[in-house]
Image (spheres, grey):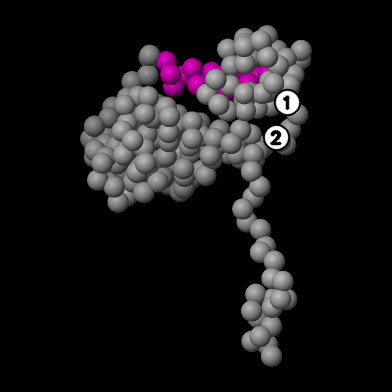
Amino acid sequence: MPRLREVPRSEVHPFGEVMYGLLFGDRDPTVEPGTASGTPGDWWSVTALSPDAFDHIAGGIQYYRSPDRQISPVLRELGQLRVGWARSSLFVYSQHCKAARDVGLTNEQVDAVPHWQVADCFSPIQRAVLAYVDCLVLQGGRVPDGVIAALKAELSEVEILELTYIITTYDMYGIISKALHLEYDNVEDPMQEVPDLDGNRAGLKRFAE
């Protein structure tokens, strides 16, 4: 279950009620969870603890989906998909596998995102976007000049700024989802000690003898 309390419908703020209606119909997500896309929906019922945060998150989604955006939906979704993989957020990754197909990425391209570096199904600008995402997420914003040059070869400065904002926003969403055990990121940490029933202390005891 999530690490923070979910907000029932009776307590949600006015805009939250609107969003609950869109996502859950007449249901209270704390009693009958589940969205039309198959997710539990607790991303929304937990972030509703802070109405300002909830509204800001909804605004971030409205931002990238706005027809005013200049960045291509294909490049945007490719970037968001790679964010999910790089941040190890199953929620972000799984949702944007579907969204990426919706905007025109092929199954081959979606499947190749984890190993894009050795895949031959991406165009030069798509590879530049994927490299940029890795620099933003995995290198904390340390971006070589060559990556920026590859982006500038085909994108305007406005498109690069929009892409940067969307990618880093979704990196934040992935971190929040993992930290609070939301949606598909409600999993145990895989880094656990594996018991040694023979008491060999990882094999070191034998060397000591």
The numbered disc on residue 2 is 2
Q: Give the quarter of the figure containing the C terminus.
A: bottom right
**Residue at left offset 29%, top offset 47%:** 119
> Could you say which is closer to the camera, residue 119 or residue 134?
119
Left or right of 8 on screen, residue 57 = left
The picture places residue 100, in percent across and down from the top left corner, at: 38, 30
Q: Amino acid at mark 2?
A: Pro
Q: Is residue 195 above or below residue 31?
A: below
Determine the residue positioned at 54% across, 40% down: 89
Numbered tag placed on residue 6 in the rendering:
1
The answer to whether one can see residue 176 in this image is no
Q: Give x and y (percent) for residue 199.
A: 73, 76
> In the rendered structure, which segment of residues is drawn in magenta?
50-66
Relative to residue 207, is residue 172 drawn left or right? left
Q: Residues within 10 Å of mark 1 (few under 14, many from 20)?
A: many
- Whether residue 53 appears in magenta in the rendering, the answer is yes
Above or below: residue 153 compared with residue 207: above
Badge 1 marks a residue whose secondary structure is: loop
Depicted 119 relative to depicted 157: above or below: below
* Main SS category, magenta section: helix
Circle 2 sits in a helix, a strand or a loop, which is it? loop
For the residues labelled 1 and 2, say whether their Cβ atoms are less than 8 Å apart.
Answer: yes
- Write the residue at 48% across / 37% down: 93
